[in-house]
Amino acid sequence: MPRPKGSKNRKTLLVENVDEKIAEVESEIARLNAELKAKKSELKTLARAKLNAEKAAAEKKAEEDKKTILAAAEASGKTLEEILDFLK
């Protein structure tokens, strides 16, 4: 005789097993939340380090540009007033 349409072979879970599973899942969620918090903290630290490195690189480039401009001004042989008039 064929099975009724809605019938399935399901295991019945014991209440103790369900409580154990719930506890395991809750502890796993807590562990993953702690791991997520640690990763977010690490990401913030890396973002700050990247920002500081970019700022230092920009300052170094500005200093090098300033030196190049001063060297070019000295090589031109013009006075400071002539250079300022030219820039206006």
Image (tube, rainbow, N blue to C red):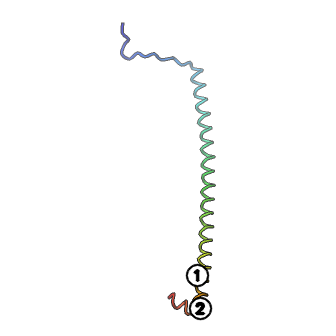
Residue 19 location, x and y as percent?
59, 25
The kind of residue on which mark 1 rests is Ile
Residue 56 location, x and y as percent?
63, 67
Residue 7 location, x and y as percent?
40, 15
Q: Identify whether 42 is placed above or below 11.
A: below
Residue closer to the observer: 57 or 52: 57
**Split into 4 quadrants, where in the image is the N terminus?**
top left
N-term-proximal mark, 2 vs 1? 1
Decide: few, some or many residues near mark 2? Use Cα within 10 Å; few <14, some 14-19, many ≥20: few
Q: For residue 14, what is the image quadrant?
A: top right
Mark number for residue 77? Answer: 2
Residue 6 location, x and y as percent?
38, 17
Q: Identify whether 34 is placed above or below 8.
A: below
Mark 1 — residue? 69
Q: For residue 81, what is the image quadrant?
A: bottom right
Of badges 2 and 1, nearer the viewer stands 2
